[in-house]
Image (spheres, rainbow, N blue to C red):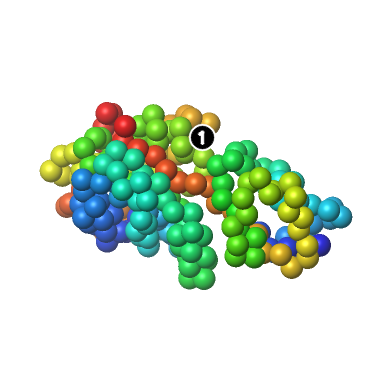
């Protein structure tokens, strides 16, 4: 179960919309089991259908989180035109077994957010609990591309 | 030897440990998909076998992050 505060959900959506039509990406950091920080990262691919993080920025983000007593809990990215389900490329490139993969779909007027764990190319849906309600997104309704 | 890995103190009992061996010890299954910094400097993957650790070293590694909607 991914526990996340409402303002972080809204922040991911804002980031995705601001970056559109390009994909947006970032880290989600937690404290005491609740995601409480959204770290927007640069998509160095600057692509509407792909993203890559900059390793130097990744190291900086992780060190910054550590200094704040936070732990990286998940990676998020947006799908501007497709559903909130990992693409073949997402699955192929999911190497980190320690994080969840959150996808923000902006394909419909109401954003859809889903979380997954991906191990050895197998995808497992993960429930999301939003701390504080949000009217701006729906979660848990897995949309397949 | 005492080193720091991803912010945590680690004791290595082997006399000589290179970066490749350290990644094995840490059970990194896809070393080609990670980036490594040794004392704040990136180390190219080709240098892992030749980069031997010494006491006090600070090693950070992370997975490349990428994907795509298609």
Instruction: State the image quarter where residue A41 is shown.
Output: bottom left
Name the residue nearer the viewer: B41 or A115: B41
The answer to whether residue B1 of the structure is visible from this angle is yes
Q: Would you call the spot at circle 1 few (<14 residues within 10 Å), some (14-19), or many (20 or more)?
A: some
Read off the residue under disc 1. Answer: A119
- Residue closest to the far right: B15
Residue A62 in the image: x percent, y percent?
Answer: 50, 61
Q: Count of labels shown?
A: 1
Left or right for A8, reference B13: left
Image quarter hosting the N terminus of chain B: bottom right
Q: Which quarter of the picture shows residue A108?
A: top left
Tell me the subunit letter for badge 1: A
Q: Residue at x 66, y 45 (%)?
A: B46
Image location (x, y in percent) of residue A106: 20, 43
In this rendering, the answer to whether A42 lies above or below A99 is below
Q: Secondary structure at mark 1?
A: strand
Could you tell me which residue is drawn at 27 percent across and 28 percent down?
A: A145
Question: Residue A45, relative to residue B69: is it above or below?
Answer: below
Q: How far across and down, in percent of the image, does residue B16 sit?
A: 83, 53
Tell me what residue is drawn at x 52 percent, y 43 percent. Answer: A96
Would residue A98 be visible to someone looking at this image? no
A34 left or right, relative to B31: left
Quadrant of the frame with the C terminus of chain B:
top left
Q: Residue at x 26, y 56 (%)?
A: A15
Residue placed most toward the observer, B47 or B22? B47
Q: Is residue A123 above or below residue B53?
A: above
């Amino acid at each position: 179960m991914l526990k996340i505060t409402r303002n972080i959900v809204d922040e991911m959506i804002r980031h995705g919309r601001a970056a559109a039509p390009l994909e947006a990406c970032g880290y989600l950091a937690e404290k005491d089991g609740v995601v409480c920080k959204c770290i927007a990262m640069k998509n160095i691919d600057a692509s509407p259908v792909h993203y890559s993080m900059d390793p130097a920025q990744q190291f900086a983000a992780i060190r910054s989180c550590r200094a704040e007593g936070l732990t990286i809990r998940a990676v998020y990215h947006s799908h501007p035109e497709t559903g909130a389900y990992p693409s073949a490329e997402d699955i192929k490139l999911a190497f980190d077994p320690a994080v969840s993969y959150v996808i923000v779909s902006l394909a419909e007027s109401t954003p859809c957010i889903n979380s997954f764990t991906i191990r050895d190319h197998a995808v497992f849906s993960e429930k999301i609990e939003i701390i504080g309600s949000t009217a701006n997104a729906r979660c848990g309704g897995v949309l397949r591309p | 030897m005492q080193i720091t890995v991803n912010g945590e103190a680690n004791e290595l009992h082997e006399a000589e440990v290179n970066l490749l061996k350290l990644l094995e010890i840490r059970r990194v299954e896809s070393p080609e998909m990670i980036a490594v910094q040794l004392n704040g400097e990136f180390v190219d993957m080709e240098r892992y076998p030749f980069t031997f650790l010494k006491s006090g070293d600070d090693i950070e590694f992370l997975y490349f992050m990428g994907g795509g909607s298609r």
